[in-house]
Amino acid sequence: MIQLYGLRMSNYYSLIKALMIEKGVEFEEVKAPPTQEEDNLSRSPMGKMPSIGVDGQYLSESLAIAAYLDRIAPQPALLPSDPLAAAKVVELICHLKLDVELVARRCLPELLFKKPVSDETRESAKAELIKGMAAVDRIFVGGPYAAGDTVTLADFYTFYTFGLATGIGKAVMDLDLLADYPRIQAVIDLMAKHPSIARVEAEKAG
Ligand SMILES: N[C@@H](CCC(=O)N[C@@H](CS)C(=O)NCC(=O)O)C(=O)O
């Protein structure tokens, strides 16, 4: 049985929980806030969530965890079998993570703790987000899923990237991140009804 460490409020924790459900992997949730305490650092060297425990060994970083889950539970496949198509899915995920989620996250303290970020941080994050959105849109396939006609890992990252980024865009930057990106909005709407994600979101309330 795999242990999933973190908190349900975390978008990346939720993403990994959804993947475990999607793949039918047995897991238990262990409440573990992100701290710089030794026990947490031993699971996740930056002290972030999520991390997982596998037979006394630990793994952090959602993409590494997703790659591990794909090996131990290959079905349902969340990466195309064609090597280049699979790499394109990972490319899209990298841009979602690095050029949208991580950029928006710089302004998270203002949304979470009402602790205003500096004008410089807000303006630079906004400019980078606009650029990041254009980059994502450029390689976003759509129709109806992020990478084409089947669900892939990129759809899970799309859902959980924008869960965080649109809230920050609206509350901190007066920016409607998805206004000009209906194909991305359509994937989010579709994935909200996807059973594994719907269960994770429902359990957040409990
Ligand atoms: N690159 C990491 C990012 C994980 C991440 O940003 N986790 C957030 C919660 S969603 C966190 O632990 N934040 C607390 C901190 O940075 O100390 C991943 O993909 O797993």
Image: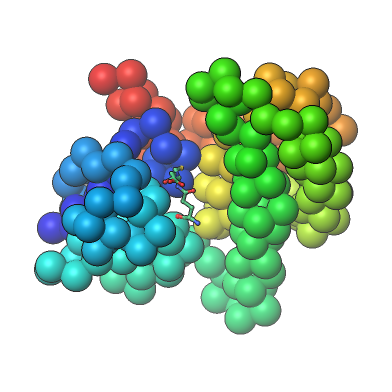
Query: Is residue 94 toward the left or the right of residue 137 in the image?
Result: left
Q: Quadrant of the C terminus?
A: top left
Residue 52 visible from this viewpoint: no
Give the vertical position of 31 relative to 128 (above or below): above
The quarter of the rendered structure image containing the N terminus is bottom left
- In the rendered image of this protein, does residue 50 appear above or below residue 69? above
Q: Who's the residue at 34% across and 25% down the image?
A: 204
**Residue 147 versus residue 57: which sits nearer the camera?**
57
Looking at the rendered structure, the number of numbered marks drawn on it comes to 0
Residue 175: % across, % down:
80, 26
Residue depicted at x 19% and y 70%: 57
Of 188 and 124, nearer the camera is: 124
Q: Residue at x 58, y 33 (%)?
A: 108
Tell me, yes or no, if residue 14 can be seen here. Answer: yes
Q: Position of residue 153 (x, y in %)?
A: 53, 57
Q: Position of residue 162 (x, y in %)?
A: 63, 37
Look at 53% across and 66% down and name the residue there: 79
Q: Is residue 18 above or below residue 113?
A: below
Q: Quadrant of residue 55?
A: bottom left
Residue 45 against residue 200 in the figure, above or below: below
x%, y% of residue 188? 62, 35
